[in-house]
Amino acid sequence: MVQLEQSVRTSDPSSYEMQSIARMDVNVLDESKNTPNDLIEKFLTLASENFSFVKNWDDPIITSSTFRVYSKRVPVTEATESYIKKVRQEFINKPGQMIEQKAIDMFKMINSRTGHRLATNEIVKEINNKTKLPSTLCFFKGAVMECTFNCRNDTFLNTDPVLIYDLPSNEKMKSWKSIKVLKIPNGWKDFSFDMSMSKNEFIELGFEEIKIPVAPENKIKLSKNMQGMRKQYGLRHRITSTIHACMGDTYESMASEISNSDPNYGLWDRGQLVVIISRTKIPQKTIFVGPKNETLDTLRKVLTKRTQWQQYINDILEIVTVNGTGSTEKYKILDPKNYPFRIADMTLPSCNTGIVYMLNSLRRRSYTYIGKTFNPRKRLNNHNSGYGSIATE
């Protein structure tokens, strides 16, 4: 279940309003104030007027600094290929501002005494699916990447984000020498960088200049009794993630694709919607890819979708809320009516408040037993321990 979070700091009132509506349970609103339909239509109007909508991922509004967010990890491979293509197009008329480093892929038969040979296109595709090291890396000033392994001296760890500030030379890349990057401070959540700042200004903010070497050679088990090996720097582009993984982060611009018809792009909870629409500082930098009408229709259905936890959480909040709008009884009780799982899966209370209980035998379904105890969890264990009354075992 996605937890709702605080939105990024923004002065845009429309962004605040959309996030507030998305957090509401429009199915249980007090209709004397706002009807559910009124709020949904208001949200869709604000979304239509403030978010950016494009037909496909090739639109120029999606740049190399645009972060891609999906509900599942299925489209990640396609997103990486699309990103490399986008970077090439963006820097085609900017010679010397981008360096592309391709991996060296090798393979051989397992237990063979012969050396490794260059991999074919089919083997390269299989290696892509079995390693975190990308086949292509595009280095340019402002690129955000992440490490793919743990450094022995703990200089960096796997998935640590880094920022490319100084572009490495072609000679250094050809000889596979270590390259310098700026390690982003731990816990840093804002990934919209002002690259007009000097390197010293970044270091004063807590960034650390480190060296990234070629990743350690790992044998990759392939089909048909083969093993592969990829030589590449221990980095990969930080360009895409699932909705859960990007919670709390802020990006210069973000693009996502949502759909009701394709399960790979579907949303199953309003909490996911809250995360998506609060990743940028201004709503115009939140980009939705695909037909605009279909996207808005998906947003409508997500707002009204209920989950098995929704009413259960409402019941819990009603108990702990002093000025609740529900029951006027002096003592509020959480009954199992809206429990999302089986009654048998509920945790037995361990407090010493006293309780009357009824047991149903699992061996003989017609047998029941009624008793009283201060600690039902302990009493049930006593019944099933084999000691005491045989009838209630």
Image: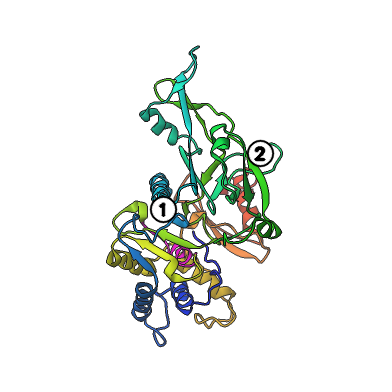
Q: Residues within 10 Å of mark 1 (few under 14, many from 20)?
A: some
Residue type at numbered disc 1: Glu
Q: What residue span does the magenta drawing correspond to? A: 266-279
Q: Residue furthest top?
A: 113
Q: Residue at x 48, y 57 (%)?
A: 65
Q: Which residue position is annotated with label 2?
A: 151
Q: x and y percent of residue 288 in the render?
A: 37, 62
In front of the other: 171 or 131: 171
| Between marks 2 and 1 in the image, the one whose residue lies nearer the viewer | 1
Sooner in the amino-acid sequence: mark 2 or mark 1: 1
Q: Residue at x 34, y 53 (%)?
A: 263
Q: Residues within 10 Å of mark 2 (few under 14, many from 20)?
A: some
Q: State the separation of the CA atoms marked 2 and 1.
A: 33 Å
SS at mark 1 in the image: helix
253 lies left or right of 261: right
Q: x and y percent of residue 325 in the render?
A: 50, 82
Question: For residue 90, which numbered disc appears in the image?
Answer: 1
Residue 268 part of the magenta segment:
yes
- Residue 333 in view in this figure: no
- The image shows residue 46, relative to residue 275, as above or below, that is below
Residue type at numbered disc 2: Cys
Picture quarter containing residue 22? Answer: bottom left
